[in-house]
Image (cartoon, grey):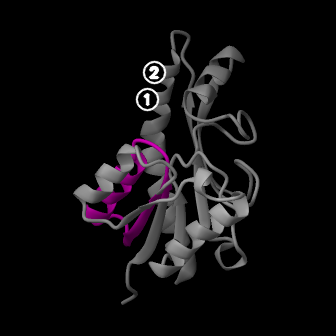
Amino acid sequence: MASPLKLGVLLSGGGTTLENLIAEIKGGTLDATVSVVVSSSPKAFGLVRAAKHDIPSRTIRLADYPDNGAFSEAISHVLRDNGVELVILAGFLKLYTIPDDYRGRVMNIHPALIPKFCGKGFYGHHVHEAVLAAGEKESGCTVHYCDNEYDHGPIILQRTVPVLDDDTPDTLAKRVFAEERKAYPEAIRRFIAEKK
């Protein structure tokens, strides 16, 4: 029997996606393990969540490196040291430049239907505000493989939600996140199935 897929989770904030993946793993619906958590901020609550589950974590700040290349290489070094097979971007607000050995092995989830409302500056509430301002009737989330551009690369799957007339960024965010909780584990399961 194959051993669980080793995940490396990159985050910058609360770590709700990390918590969701841990719940899926503990519930037996995701054959994986979180080997390491890397945060771009020492204040990220995701680090507290990692500690609670005894997951090793590291803070790697862009400000401590001369450029994005050195910052990204520091992250890659930690991922390799922990045997990470698939990198999960979970609200990671910096650009991670993907080295050759991790091409096709970095996933991101975006709270909109790519190619709409994505790219630099489109994260969190900024996305939901833009969707509402544009009068969209539908939104959702997209899981995709990353390349070295923000919110770009082959799409793995999308899940949709209706945009309601009385939606606020908060109510829309809540509905989209409910779909994210299903979409990300499903995308990882697909990766595992393809690997077999």
Q: Position of residue 44 (x, y in %)?
A: 41, 45
User: Which quadrant, please, contains the N terminus?
Assistant: bottom left
Give the image quarter of residue 64.
Answer: bottom right
Q: Residue at x 50, y 73 (%)?
A: 78
Residue where numbered disc 2 is placed: 171
Is residue 83 visible in the rendered structure shown here? Answer: no
Of the residues shown, which amino acid type is indicated by label 1?
Lys
Left or right: where 167 falls relative to 63: left
Q: Is residue 84 left or right of residue 33?
A: right
User: Judging from the image, what secondary structure is the residue with disc 2 in?
Assistant: helix
Residue shown at 48% from the left, 48% from the top: 41
Asked if residue 71 lies in the magenta stretch, the reply is: no
Q: Locate residue 134, reporting x and y percent.
A: 72, 18
Q: In the rendered image, which residue does mark 1 sit on?
A: 174
Question: For the point 61% across and 27% down, which residue is it?
Answer: 126
Whether residue 109 is situated above or below residue 30 in the rendered picture = above
Mark 2 and mark 1 residues within 8 Å of each other at the beta carbon: yes
Between residue 126 and residue 96, name the one nearer to us. Answer: 96
Q: Position of residue 56 (x, y in %)?
A: 34, 67
Q: Is residue 194 visible?
A: yes
Q: Is residue 159 above or below residue 98?
A: above
Would you call the spot at circle 1 few (<14 residues within 10 Å), some (14-19), or many (20 or more)? few
Residue at far top of view: 166
Identify which residue, 191 or 145, lies in the foreground. Answer: 145
On screen, residue 174 above or below 29: above
Magenta-tinted stretch: 10-38
